[in-house]
Amino acid sequence: MIQVNLSNIRPFIGLPYEAALAPRLHIAHKHLQQGDGVGSDFTGWVHLPEQYDREEFARIKAAARRIQSDSQALVVIGIGGSYLGARGAIECLCSANYNLKKKNTPNIYFVGNGLSSDQLSEVMELLEGVDFSVNVISKSGTTTEPAVAFRFFRRMLEDKYGVKGAARRIYATTDRARGALKSLADSAGYETFVVPDDVGGRYSVLTAVGLLPIAVAGVDIDALMAGAADMMTVCAADDMASNPAWQYAGARYELYRGGRKIEILASYEPNFRFMAEWWKQLYGESEGKENKGLFPASVEFTADLHSMGQYIQQGERHLLETVVRFGASAHENPVPYDTANGDGLNFLAGKPMDFIRQQAMDGTLLAHVEGGVPNIILQAGQINPFTLGELIYFFEYACGLSGYLLDVNPFDQPGVEAYKKNMFALLGKPGYEDLRAQLERKLGR
Ligand code: PA5
C-alpha cells in the first residue's frame, strides 16, 4: 500500500483545497476509468494489470528462461518509454550494480537510448567472446536511435551465429501489425511481442516492453503485476479519502497553482535513480505542453544533499519536493564500535544504518519545510517486485489525473517531433530537402 502524507504541504496552502478539487478529480477519474477523455485511445494501461494477454505473458517468461539458458548477456535496444521502465525496475529490484554482481542471470546492457559512438563501441567490446541475445523494443518501429543501434547488434549476431542462429536470438517488441520493425521481424522470423495499440510508450513498462528484460534479470514478474493489480483496485476508488493517486495529483496540482513550478522527486535509495528517470519522462511528457506543467526533476539523497541541498534549502522558492520512502532494509548493518574513537562516531556504534538514515530523512524534511519547500511523502513498502508494481501503477494513475487537471492530453507528445524533423533534414533524409536548406542557412553552413 502507498500512503500519501500531506501534512508538510499544509503551511504552504492557504485554504483546504480538497473539497473544491474533488469534483474535477472525479471527472478526470471517470475519464480514465471509462476511457472517454482526451487521448482516450491510449488508456489501455488503466485496466492492464488485470486485462493483459496471459498467453503472451507465458511466452515472455519462456523467452526469459531461454535467454537465461543460452546467453551470458542481453542487449536491450530502446529509448524513452521503450527503455526507462525496464532499466528503472531492474536497477531498483536487482541493483544499479546488477551487471557486476555474482548471479546466474545474464548481464543486461541498454543501448539505442542515445547516439553516443563511444557507448556503442564499449558495449560491442564487452560482448566480445560472450554469448548474447538482443531484445529490440520500439512501438513505432521507426525511432532512429534504436533502429541505428539494432543494425550494429544484428550484424554482430549474424557474424557470430549466422543469419538463422541470429534470428533465434533476436526478440522484437513492437506494434502488433505496423512499422518497419514488425515487417523486419516477420520476414526474418524473430519472436515478437506486442506493445498494445492503446498503451503509449511511457505507460508501457508493464507490457512486454518492460516485462521481458525485467524477467531476464530474474525478477518475479507475477509479483510485479500483482502489485500493480492491487494498486489498480485502490485507485479505482472514486473519492479523495481512499484514493492515494487523487491525494498526490490533487496536492501537486494545488501547489503548482500556487507557484511551485518544479517538482523534485527524492529518494534515499541509490537504486531508485532510474525509476526517477522513468517518472521524469512519465510526468514531463504527459504534462509539459501548451506552456503548462510542473518541471520534473530528481535527486538522490543523501548524496545530493551535498550538492543540490544548498539550492533546495535556500534557492528560489518555486520547488516542491516529493519523497519516496521505502520500508526497512533487509540488511541491519550496525555501525562498528571503535576503541580509539578517532572519528568521534562511537555515539553511533551499534545503531543500524536504517536508523541513521531515518534520522537523516526526518532532519532533512524539517529543514526543507522550514526553508520553504512543501514536502509530500509517499510511503511505500519494502523494496520488492510487489511494492514496485504498486508504485508504477500509482504514478501512472496520478499522472493521467494530473494531465486532465491541467486540461492537457496526458497521452500525446507532439513536441518530441520538432528535433526529429530537424535531425532528419540535417542528415539528408529524402523528403526533407527544403527544411535542410533552411536549417543549413540558419547554421551558417
Ligand atoms: O512515451 C513515448 O511515447 C516515447 O518516449 C517513446 O516511448 C519513445 O520515443 C520511443 O518510441 P518507440 O517505442 O516508438 O521507438
Image (spheres, rainbow, N blue to C red):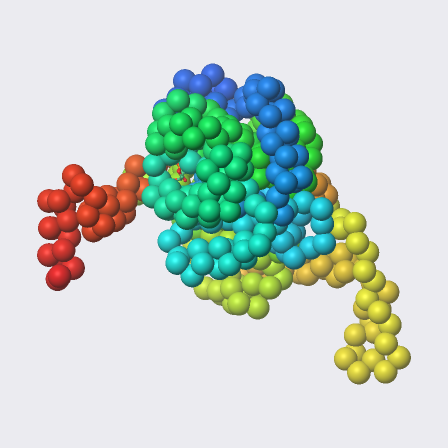
* Residue 211 placement (x, y as % from top left): 58, 34
Regarding residue 182, the answer to whether it shows in the image is no
Q: Quadrant of ligand 1?
A: top left
- In front here: 370 or 25? 25
Where is 160 relative to 189, above or below?
A: below
* Residue 200 placement (x, y as % from top left): 43, 31
Q: Quadrant of residue 270?
A: bottom right
* Residue 143 placement (x, y as % from top left): 35, 40
**Residue drawn at 60 percent across, 64 percent down:** 303
Q: Most extreme residue toward the front, as rendered?
A: 162
* Residue 379 placement (x, y as % from top left): 66, 43
**Residue drawn at 69 percent across, 35 percent down:** 220
Please give the count of numbered marks on the rendered protein.
0
Regarding residue 417, the answer to whether it shows in the image is yes
Q: Is residue 292 left or right of residue 366?
A: left
**Residue drawn at 57 percent across, 35 percent down:** 212
- In front here: 306 or 170? 170
Q: Quadrant of residue 100?
A: bottom right
State which quarter of the image contains the C terminus. bottom left
Q: Is residue 415 left or right of residue 47?
A: left
**Residue drawn at 56 percent across, 20 percent down:** 53
- In front here: 228 or 310? 228
Q: Quadrant of residue 219?
A: top right
Where is 8 relative to 181, above or below?
A: below
State which quarter of the image contains the N terminus. top right
